[in-house]
Image: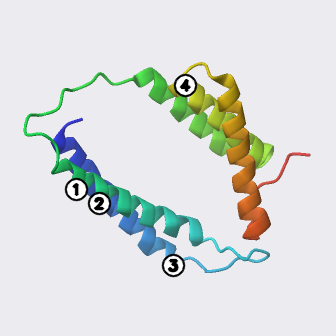
Amino acid sequence: MSRTFDRIASVLFLLVGIFFIMESRKLSASAYGSEVGPDLFPLGLGILLVLLSLRLMVETFRYPSAEMKTTKLDVKRFGIILLAAILYAVLLEPLGYVLSTFLFLVVAFQTMEKGKWLSTIVFSGLFSSGVYYLYVGLLKGTLPGFPL
């Protein structure tokens, strides 16, 4: 990527992260039947986005003086992952968190690097079920359950 693009992107992501943090403070701190409130995810996402955008901004100053070589955009992969993300959002409630997240991760991993089916399936299964257990079991939050 180019230095200019990365700097502009880092500023935009920084603004979006600050917006997420400010707006998450307006949400209630707890929800009925859950110890984890609706403000936790957007707040965490905003903080992560601010930190990553600051990191990107710092790295742009370390780029070599010559502009980096431009690469061709991979529209096909982007389209597949975008479609998978849209389907993930649509199917989250009907299929439940674990199954829809598992399917999304399998599609995304196979889109990025074909082959390695065993590691894709194992990692997707462990991640989706692990996050579900941590969030629902330990933090007493609520996520869409299994469809049955």
Q: Residue at x 65, y 41 (%)?
A: 88
Say which element carries label 4: helix
Give the residue pinned by disc 2: 54
The disc at residue 26 is: 3
Q: Which quadrant of the view contains residue 106?
A: top right
How packed is label 2: few (under 14 Cα within 10 Å), some, or many (20 or more)?
some
Cα gap from disc 4 to disc 1, whole angstroms: 30 Å
Image position of 30 with respect to 38: above or below: below
Give the residue pinned by disc 4: 111
Say which element carries label 2: helix
Q: Of marks 3 and 1, which one's residue comes earlier in the chain?
A: 3
Number of numbered labels in the structure image: 4
Give the residue pinned by disc 1: 58
Say which element carries label 1: helix
The x and y percentages for residue 77 are: 47, 25
Amino acid carrying label 3: it is Lys
Q: Nearer the viewer, mark 3 or mark 2?
A: 2
- Inspect this view and state whether residue 143 appears: no
The x and y percentages for residue 21 are: 44, 71
Q: Which quadrant of the view contains residue 50?
A: bottom left
Apparent side of residue 73 relative to residue 141 in the rendered image (left or right): left
Cα gap from disc 3 to disc 1, whole angstroms: 30 Å
Q: Which residue is drawn at 60% across and 19% down?
A: 115
Cα gap from disc 2 to disc 1, whole angstroms: 6 Å
Look at the image and name its color scheme.
rainbow
Cα gap from disc 4 to disc 3, whole angstroms: 38 Å
Q: Which of marks 4 and 1 is in front?
A: 1
Cα gap from disc 4 to disc 2, whole angstroms: 29 Å
